Each structure stands twice: as C-alpha cells, then as structure tokens.
Image (cartoon, grey):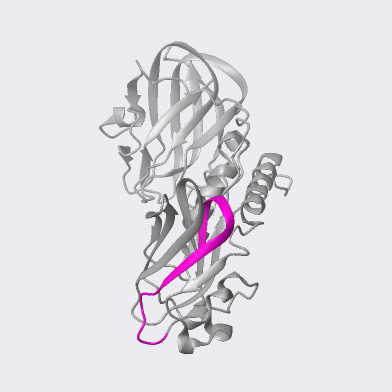
Amino acid sequence: MPAEADVSLRPGWFYHASQNHQVKSPSTLMDLYYKSVGRGANLDLGLSPNRDGLLDDTDVNALKGFGELLKETFSTNLAKGANLKASNVRANSASKFGPANLLDEDRYSYWSTDDAVHTPTLTITLPQERTFNVIRLRENIKLGQRIEAVEVEALRNNKWEKIGAATSIGANRLIRLPEPVKARQLRLTISKSPVSIALSDFGLYMEPKRMEASPAPAKHAAEVSKSGWKVIASSAGDKVQNAIDGNAASIWSAESAAVFKPASIDIDLGFPVEIAAFSYLPRQDKKTDGVADQYSFFVSEDGKDYREVASGEFSNIMANPIEQVISLKEKVQARYIRFVGKRSLDGKGITIAELGIRK
C-alpha cells in the first residue's frame, strides 16, 4: 500500500504575504522528493492561492526551480550502454528475465532469479568511467515488494568498496550518495529477500550543483528580542511569563467560567519600540483548548491608556495552527502592548504559546 507524504509549500496550508520568505526553496523541495518519492511514497505538495486566486510569484519560482532540478538530475541515465552480468537468471531465459531488462524503457520488464535464489549479485560495467551521486532502483511492483536489503559497491584500485545501501526498494528507491562517485564497474548485491527477486530498473544519475539566490527578506521579518519583557497584568491564570519565554512548548492559560470571557495580557517591552506587526503562536501540543481565533491588539505609551491598532480573526487557525503574523496598517511606537483573545475555538478560555512583535 503506497504511503503518502503530505507537505505544504508554505509554513501552513494558507497564503500569507508575510510568509513569502518561508516558501520552500527548490533545494528543500528536492530534499523532500528524495525522502518521499525516493522512498516509494507519493509526494502530495500543497499549494496556497493568494487573495487573487493565483499562485504568488514566489511560489511559482520555487516550483519552477524544483522542476528544473528534477529534469536536470533524471534526464540522463548514466548506466545506459552498460554491460550487465547476473549471477543467476530465472530459467536461464535472458530475453524474458535477463538483466538487460533493467535498462530498457519498459517500466515492468524485469530481471528475475530462480525460486531458490534470493540473494543474487549483478555486475555493471559502464562504457567508461562516469561520475554519479544518485542510484535509482525499482521493483516490478505488480509482483509485490520483495527485496528487503540491497548494497551497491564500486571497484576502486582493484578493490570493491561499498558506496550505498537500502533496506527496501518497492516501487521506487533513490539512494543519494553523500558525495559523487567516479567509477566504471559496480556491483549490486541483493542481501535479503524472502523470495526470488523481480527488479525492473537500475539507474545512475548526477544531480547538478545547486545555485540558489538568497530569498528576498520578508516585510516585517525582523523579530524584536524579548529580553527585558515583563508581563505587568493579565485577566486570569498563572505562569503568565510562559507567553513571552521563547519556549513554544510552554503556554499561558486563562481558563474561563461556564460563560466565556475574553482574556487579556499586558506586557512592558522595557523601552519604546517601533512596531510594524505582532504575532500570536497557538499552543503546539496538537490540542485546540483555548486557541484564540479572534483578537484585538493594543499599544500604550504609559501603560495606562491603551489604543486598539488591530483586530480581526485568525483565518482557519484550527487547520493552520502556526504562528499568526498580523501586520499593522501603520507602524506605531510604544513601550506597552496588550493582547486580547476575544474568542477561542472551544469557547472555554484563551491559551498562548508565544506573543511577539516585529519591526
């Protein structure tokens, strides 16, 4: 049964302009490809349209770069033209079960062994020395996943050296080597299989050197240090410093009575700070108790008179429980801030993992 690897191109499943700098790079997507498709899984990459119903240019460029990396890596099988010699071929039928089937264009033609042979070897002699850093193996998955362990060696200075291994193959296995290998002769050993094998593909590839421009800095990306911050008031609850301790695992909880009441927390920043955005991190323990979905954010110069500078709703925070960054309409300067959780998902109180501001 094929596994499915679900991952979003962005930090969460929804579009936020403030997260443009956090869109996964082509290199990161390539790493995910090796860890999912390269292990026989389906990569389900989630994309988030912007407010115009389109993919943002940042997302498009990341996907384009990822596609180019894939094409450049897998466009040429460096094993093509190799001479393949197997220790055993099923029924001595080279045309039907021989190792040449590993290099043809038929996804389901395969090299197979007699029923009693479970750990055969295959020697690959390339037309000339070639440099590669990716080995691709595939089984004829129509006949089930059979191979449980495999090793690949390269002949260097007349001595076989192990360069790669895997514990299973299945529909697709990509063995990514830590560094490029230059060799002409290789040896593939099936070291564990409960039955005769049905290997359908062998490939050698060279991943191109990755040259990526640094991502553009995000607007309001500079997070203000919390050193010197102090909670000076809260509507309820203890452990109030948990809301600003820099530890996503700790939370401040303001439990309410039977009837929900908004919860607030006032923070002294220590000195006046220019504020362009504030952030709210919901609890990260996979619980929804007290997660705020409606908020108000206030600022004050003296800690007594507060004015509201932002209010609204954290869009679908239940399905998107990541840090919520809210940009202010205009930058403000203040020493004191107040966060008010006006409503929670469960209607039983407000919890905060972390509050922050950005300039």
Number of numbered markers: 0
Q: Nearer the viewer, residue 2 or 347?
A: 2
Q: Nearer the viewer, residue 262 or 108?
A: 108
Q: Residue at x 55, y 26 (%)?
A: 221
Q: Quadrant of residue 336?
A: top left
Q: Quadrant of residue 56?
A: top right
Q: In the image, residue 254 lies at what x, y percent?
A: 32, 38
Q: Is residue 307 above or below residue 138?
A: above
Quadrant location of the C terminus in the rendered image: top right
Q: Residue at x 44, y 49 (%)?
A: 345
- Identify the magenta region: 114-136
- Residue at the limit of the structure toward the front, as seen here: 158
Q: Is residue 75 left or right of residue 239?
A: right
Q: In the image, residue 240 lies at what x, y percent?
A: 30, 29
Quadrant location of the N terminus in the rendered image: bottom left
Evaluate whether residue 284 shows in this view. yes
Q: Nearer the viewer, residue 303 or 29?
A: 29
Q: In the image, residue 211 lies at what x, y percent?
A: 61, 36
Evaluate whether residue 172 shows in this view. no
Q: In the image, residue 130 lies at what x, y percent?
A: 57, 51
Q: Residue at x 54, y 51 (%)?
A: 132
Q: Is residue 132 left or right of residue 166?
A: right
Residue 133 magenta-highlighted: yes
Q: Residue at x 40, y 51 (%)?
A: 346
Q: Is residue 63 left or right of residue 321?
A: right
